[in-house]
């Protein structure tokens, strides 16, 4: 059950776009379209932002989008805003019917 | 309002036990699969355990297998995590999280995502 690989940090200026990658294996990210993304502000519970690779729950801004290619999933945030500064985590279903998270990425809005 | 509220956290000595509870409200608890997810101080999220809606199917992360037991009482709208043989590395905020399900036509499918989270309860294992 190795954690999915995410960059430790990314940054961008307001209005710009950033992309966070999430790399796994064919036993998790590459094998299923059950990749989800979460936003977590300090001291708060995580919030679901993307499910099934690219779907947004009701109420999540369309500035957030997801995609997948092979064993790597990606979260793109366009039109960066100050409130987007947070930690972001990817998660995937695995071939063992388990779940695995990425190590998390700290997004800084400059 | 759909809500999950954890309780039962606290300070426990290494080797000790603790039972966490998660009270659900605002939705039909018995229809949903549930999970425990933890986060060590300053660290990332770690999935801990899953239980099906009926309680018949259970999975654990390797890090807690044999020491933790997940259970639920659908009559009481509650999820539990019995934690035994606690170690310092179990120190974390423990969240209960609901599995997201979607209705697509006449089919109800799980997306593998966690759509509702509690506020978390802190467990500290230290002497």
Image (cartoon, grey):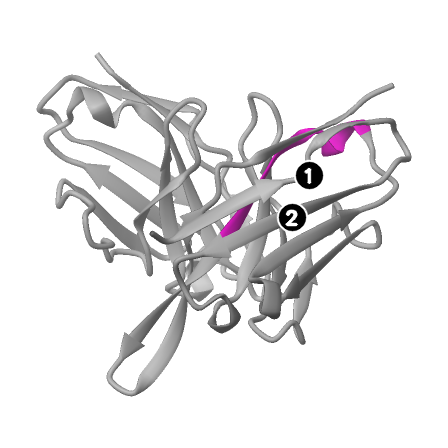
Picture disc at residue B21: 2
Task: Name the spot of residue A4 as percent of width and height, x first.
Answer: 51, 44
Query: Dominant secondary structure of the magenta stretch?
Result: strand
Magenta stretch contains residue B96: yes
Is B121 located above or below residue B62 in the figure?
above
Residue at image position (22%, 39%) is: A76
Q: Can residue B63 be seen in this view?
A: yes
* Highlighted range, magenta: B88-97
Q: Nearer the viewer, residue A87 or B21?
A: B21
Is B48 located above or below residue A79 in the figure?
below
Q: Which chain carries label 2?
A: B
Residue at image position (65%, 65%) is: B73
| Residue lying furthest bottom | B106
Give the mark nearer the N terminus: 2 vs 1.
1
Q: Mark 1 lies on which chain?
A: B
Quarter of the view holding residue B80: bottom right
The answer to whether residue A64 is left or right of residue B47 is left
Quarter of the view holding residue A97: bottom right
Q: How far apart are marks 2 and 1 (CA)?
A: 6 Å
Quadrant (top left/top right/bottom left/bottom right) for the C terminus of chain A = top left
Residue at image position (40%, 63%) is: B27
Task: Name the spot of residue A75 as percent of width and height, x first.
Answer: 28, 42
* Number of other residues with Cα within 10 Å of mark 2, as a class: few under 14, some 14 to 19, many 20 or more: many
Answer yes or no: do the residues labelled 2 and 1 have beta carbons within 8 Å?
yes
Q: In the structure shown, which secondary structural element does the residue marked by tag 2 occupy?
A: strand
Q: Name the residue under label 1.
A: B8
């Amino acid at each position: 059950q190795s954690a999915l690989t995410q960059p430790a940090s990314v940054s961008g200026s307001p209005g710009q776009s950033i992309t966070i990658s999430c790399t796994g294996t064919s036993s998790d990210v590459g094998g299923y379209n059950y990749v989800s993304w979460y936003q977590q502000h300090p001291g708060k519970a995580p919030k679901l932002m993307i499910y099934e690779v690219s779907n947004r729950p009701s109420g999540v801004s369309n500035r957030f989008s997801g995609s997948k290619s092979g064993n790597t999933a990606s979260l793109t945030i366009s039109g960066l805003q100050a409130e987007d500064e947070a930690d972001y985590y990817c998660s995937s279903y695995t071939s063992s019917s388990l779940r695995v998270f990425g190590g998390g990425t700290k997004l800084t809005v400059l | 309002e759909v809500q999950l509220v954890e309780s039962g956290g606290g300070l426990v000595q290494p080797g000790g036990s603790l039972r966490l509870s998660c009270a659900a409200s605002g939705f039909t608890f018995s229809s949903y699969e549930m999970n425990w997810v933890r986060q060590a101080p300053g660290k990332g999220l770690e999935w801990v355990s899953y239980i099906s809606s009926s309680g018949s199917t259970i999975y654990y992360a390797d890090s807690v297998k044999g020491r933790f037991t997940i259970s639920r009482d659908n009559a009481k709208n509650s999820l539990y995590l019995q934690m035994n043989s606690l170690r310092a590395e179990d120190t974390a905020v423990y969240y209960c999280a609901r599995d997201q399900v979607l209705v697509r036509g006449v089919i109800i499918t799980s997306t593998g995502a966690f759509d509702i989270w509690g506020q978390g309860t802190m467990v500290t294992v230290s002497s």
